[in-house]
Amino acid sequence: MDKFVITGGRALSGEVVISGAKNAALPIILCTMLTKDSIVLKNLPELRDTATCFKLLEILGKKYQKLNDNEYLIEGEVTSKVAPYDLVKTMRASIMALGPLTAFLGEAEVSLPGGCAIGARPVDLHVKGLIEMGAKMHLEEGYIRAQAVGGRLHGARIVMDKVSVTGTENLMMAASLADGVTIIENAAREPEIVDLADCLRMMGAKIRGDGTATIEIEGVKELHGGEHTIVADRIEAGTYLVAGMATHGFVTLHNTLPSSLEAVLAKLRQANALIEINGTDITLDMRGRDIMPVDIVTAPHPGFPTDMQAQFMVLNAIAQGSSSVTETIFENRFMHVPELIRMGARLKIEGNTVMIQGVPNLKGAQVMATDLRASASLVIAGLVAEGQTIVDRIYHMDRGYEHIERKIRGLGGTIERVSA
């Protein structure tokens, strides 16, 4: 099993190009199931999760080929209704095959998903919405089995019990081929939702209201092919900004979407970073500046993203003062806390909040990644710490960060991937 060996103590400096968004790429790859026409996707990040999505498409009957770096052609027609356990267990996003399969074929069998162990993330919102759209659903031998009555889903007014990004995306895809109008209330508002809607509109879907809490989709009989470019990854961008700040560096990010990072940029400025925005470039300067503590409360977009919580905990751990981080989205998302404590951080979990007292230095140690964003926090901690840090189980990192060690080395960081 691969691990990272990191030598800390060097300020990151230089330029880094931000990749396409993982959380936009996965549903967009899966939405190609809604048409038999060819689709070209650009700015696709090379990640374990995107590779898993392509394998799933192949199992379901689609074909794909790489055209250039980060550019893929997807063609063919879905012929199988079964998304098998062996594949789905590795990636929770696979549940998003349920909506498009049911909409396109009229039936689907999707294994209950796996992925990061950061909370239950129940699929009941997906199931409930499809039932309201006319699907018969039942659970059998670990598979969710869906069948559209009469072969096609129909429009419905769906009120989400809680905000769910993947739930919203699943129902958006299903509604695009349903008969009639579907209205999703209490919908997720993330930029990745908007990017999926943009791709579906390119394919001929009639969608409006994406980016707000109410999305309206008028179903069409069929969707067509075309070309779409994946939006920039706001979480990757935020991660490199935090890494630059934590090491008192000077970094410029290219190919970003600054409007998607407003909550993160506000907290970075509050923590005493100098930040300049020029089009799609973001520059952070932390040379000779102290890190000030900031309180964090995660919330659905446009609030502070849960996927940046772990990274900011490292910042607060070396800030000059006390702070708190409160997680409201997922339970069990503080598994990085014991690992940071091993590196000298002064952290205390109280319910869904971590109380933090900043320390002057972190110390290198052997630590274990427990989920994707926890992996990022431990890498940042290693770049800050005195001495050497070994991060085990970095396969989580490969699910969501494209060529992270190459990009960090490009900024002057000392990091190596070592195979066990």
Image (cartoon, rainbow, N blue to C red):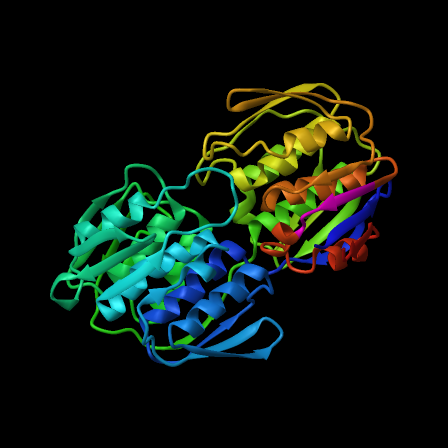
Q: How many marks?
A: 0
Please tell me which residue is depicted at 39% across the width and 50% down the height of the picture. 166
Quadrant where the C terminus sits is bottom right
Q: Quadrant of residue 398?
A: bottom right
Q: Is residue 364 magenta?
A: no
- Return the residue nearer the eye: 26 or 241: 26
In magenta, the rendered stretch is 389-394
Give left or right: position of 157 versus 262.
left
Please tell me which residue is depicted at 20% across the width and 63% down the height of the picture. 178
Please tell me which residue is depicted at 35% across the width and 40% down the height of the picture. 163
x, y (%) of residue 348? 63, 19
- Return the residue nearer the eye: 96 or 175: 96
Give left or right: position of 11 versus 65.
right
Q: Residue furthest left?
A: 150
Q: Quadrant of residue 344?
A: top right
x, y (%) of residue 356? 66, 21
Q: Is residue 393 magenta?
A: yes
Measured along the vertical axis of the image, is residue 97 above or below residue 337? below
x, y (%) of residue 381? 75, 37
Please, what is the dominant secondary structure of the magenta stretch?
strand
